[in-house]
Image (spheres, rainbow, N blue to C red):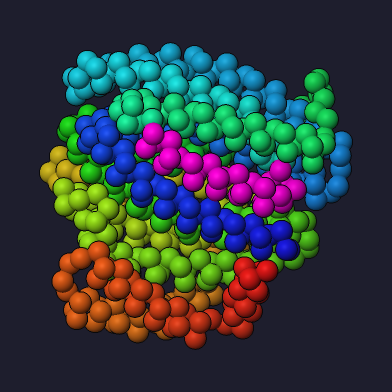
Amino acid sequence: MKERIKGVTLSYIYMATHIFVSFISVPIILKFVGEEEYGVYQIVGALISYVAIFETSISGGTLKYFSQAVAKKSQQDMKIVLSISRKINRYLSFALVLICVLFLTLFKFFYEESLLHSQMNESLIMIILLFLNLIFSLSNSIYLAAITSYEKFTFLRLILIVSKLIQPLMYSFFLKIFPYAVTIVVIQLCINLILCLFRYLYFKKHIRITIPRKISNPTLLRSMLFFSTSILLSSIADQIFWKTDQLILGSMFSPTIVAVYSIGSQIYYNYMLIGIQASTVFYPELSRLNQKSDGIQLMSNLFIKVGRISYYLLFSIVIGFMLFGKEFIHIWVGSNFEESYYIALIVMIPFTIDIVQHIGLNILQVINKYSFRAKIYLFSAILNILSTLVLSKYMGALGAALSTGITMLITSGFILNWYYYSIVKLDIIRFWKEIIFITIRLIPSVLVGFFINLIIDEFSLFNFILKLVLFLSFYLINCYLTMNDYEKKLIINLVGFVKR
């Protein structure tokens, strides 16, 4: 329990660090490489994210079965899981080399007309480097899964925090000398290699599990592949859903339009990071609860507890961005990116449903019902592509954002909640009653925010910070008065932990 509290606390510290670094990195990158070059980097990054799902899928399968072995305290099962995962990773690494060649060919075919010759050559180099980065991450994923299963969250979060803090320093130094998008990719590759090394060394020193070179367990292999395939399908859908917008815009418009959309997407991506932090450390706990006779009821209670805690934070961000977002974007990246405010807001509002229920995806993985999520999101991804092609033609980047928002509302808002309630038997009715109750109780904060905006209407950095501080101060008081006894106790314990 103490390690989980530390893990959640450090997760939010990492989240804050990540957001802070990403926000200060964008102006640095734009200053040295410009909007066109930044747009090229985003196009390549969106393309590579499709392949990164292989690593996510396999590490998810390793985490599930290794967590089960840890819960049973079976050293032999742990060794078998890691051995099988390593074998799968080797085959996937070879497949990634072949996919890289295919990607290079397809990229030249689709973007030959929209990119300059120099931009095309730079993009091809970035693709190779990003694939290399992915292969290193894939080989390291078994150590990450093992450390996570043992709930060593303090170590994992600390090295991530440090790695994030050094990024803008490296950007500032190297982009000044080499002002190209490929420099960003080289820096990311170097940082990832250091992270992989630290995880490997920690695994060897503290986990101390010898991974057998040759081991046979066809039943477990089939189970892991089936589970990983479910995650893979869902991840493919996610990538189509989130990254296709940028690829479509990149083929229809200039890289500058992609840059504007990317600024908006970075805001709702960071919004997602904030919302899911509370649920990221509960996978091992869910694996233990699932083995009990009343496991679904216990997981349902945890689903509601984590959802309530996440919602306090999410509501403040959506309302705060709605009130002060235009000023923030103007201060952050300048007046040329005002459209990014509407792009972010259109997606953030329906996205809240998905984020506040993020722990539900972990529950689906634990009870082996994740394949439904994969199927429904694959359908939504295809629907998003079709609607983006139509709406983008008439509304540009705003059309792409509107398509994403509407599709998300249908899938996460209606279909997935129906599945949670009817099939998984989570207490969704109680969940939404709790969320609606919190929303009503927090309405005074919204009114105060509008009032603050009215009385302090002159634009300046000082006024922006003043309005934000006034709004958050009232919101925190409003939140504490709305919280139940369990949540108030968590706040008191958290404050005590931070002090210590």
User: Splitting the image into 4 quarters, where does residue 109 fall?
Assistant: top left
Above or below, 477 relative to 348? below
Magenta span contains residue 295? no
Q: In terms of depth relative to the viewer, which is nearer, 135 or 356?
A: 135
Residue at 76% x, 56% y is: 288
Above or below, 169 relative to 106? below
**Residue 301: percent from the left, percent from the top?**
64, 70
Magenta span contains residue 156? yes
Which quadrant: the N terminus? bottom right
Residue at 60% x, 49% y is: 157
Above or below, 435 relative to 285? below
Residue at 80% x, 32% y is: 80
Is 280 situated left or right of 264 in this image? right
Q: In terms of depth relative to the viewer, which is nearer, 407 or 114?
A: 114
The stretch in magenta equals 147-173
Is 148 situated left or right of 115 in this image? right
